[in-house]
Image: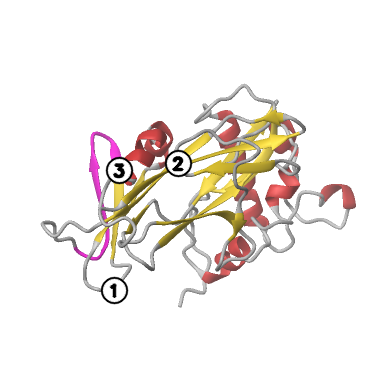
Amino acid sequence: MQGQCKPYTVKVRVTTVNGRIALLEDNGTEIPGYIDESFWLGGDVMGAEGMPKKLKGKTLEEVLKARTTPSDKEEEKVDAISGATLSSDAVKYAVIDGLRSKPLREGTGEIAPPTFQSSRQVALNGKINHIFVTMKAPEGTVIHYTTDGSEPTEDSPTPSQDPIFHEDFGADLRAGSETYPDGREILLKAAAFQDGKRSETVTGRYVFANPNPKHSYELGQFSGKAEGITARVEFESPNFDQKYYLTKICLDDVSEKTYAAFLRNCSARFI
């Protein structure tokens, strides 16, 4: 059991509208010990009342001035998370880095588009397998999505509740070897709507595939480096049947930003 605090890299995804933060989310932060994890995942730092709420609506200049050190003075503790100063600071500086960097995607709409988050983009084609894609958008908007590649409208489905983590809402994607014996590729599209206005459409690609018997992989995580790019891949056996396949591809921070779109498509096509 890891009880001590250890260094780790905070990763966040920031969506802005007209220069102000509309949505702040975790973007794959890996926590090395349960003390930090209790702050990070327990609802203190990145929970509903944590840094996403405290930094919402702020500009880069306002984030730079944000105070994350607890204080008895009311005006100095407005942006602080009690007992989690280091984690709060880490989020603050990650947000500043994000706001100063080149956007991964730019839009012209007045409404911030939804964001997707899921534990994987590839799943084994079977009866019990599914991929739940959490969807988030700025408060006051309504998300509508499609799974057939068509453009979402206000008549399209809205996110449903996660059957396991009830605080999350999104799309529960499934295939099933009986319905789709050769596997299935799902093109998930979503947009946010508010008062007759519509955001841009965001797209995610998710795959249910049959394992390739010609390939034999080993369980675990492996990393390699080529031409300045560091990649880490993960092989799992979701059905615990000693059949392993590639479920995740991660690049170093710089490369992940540069090749974000390619990485999404690449991850969805490997198994």
Label 2 crowd (10 A; few <14 / some 14-19 / many >=20): few
Q: Which residue is mark 2?
A: 148
Residue shown at 71% from the left, 64% from the top = 83
Q: Which mark is residue 230?
A: 3
Residue 226 at x, y = what percent?
Answer: 22, 38
The foreground one among 116 and 158 is 158
Q: Earlier in the sequence, mark 3 or mark 1?
A: 3
Look at the numbered disc 3 and give the secondary structure of its residue.
strand
> In this image, 247 relative to 130: left or right?
left
Q: Which residues are magenta?
A: 218-230
- Cβ–Cβ under 8 Å for marks 2 and 1: no
Type of amino acid under label 2: Asp
Considering the whole magenta stretch, tell me its main secondary structure: strand
Spatial CA span between label 2 and label 1 = 31 Å
Residue 119 at x, y = what percent?
Answer: 45, 57
Mark in front: 3 vs 1: 1
Mark in front: 3 vs 2: 2
Spatial CA span between label 3 and label 2 = 34 Å
Q: Which residue is mark 1?
A: 240
Residue shown at 61% from the left, 56% from the top = 160
Q: Which mark is residue 19?
A: none
Farthest residue to the right: give it.
Answer: 74
Residue 153 at x, y = what percent?
Answer: 61, 35
Q: Earlier in the sequence, mark 3 or mark 2?
A: 2
Type of amino acid under label 1: Phe
> In this image, 182 relative to 95: left or right?
left
The foreground one among 134 and 44 is 134
Q: Is residue 204 above or below residue 207?
A: above
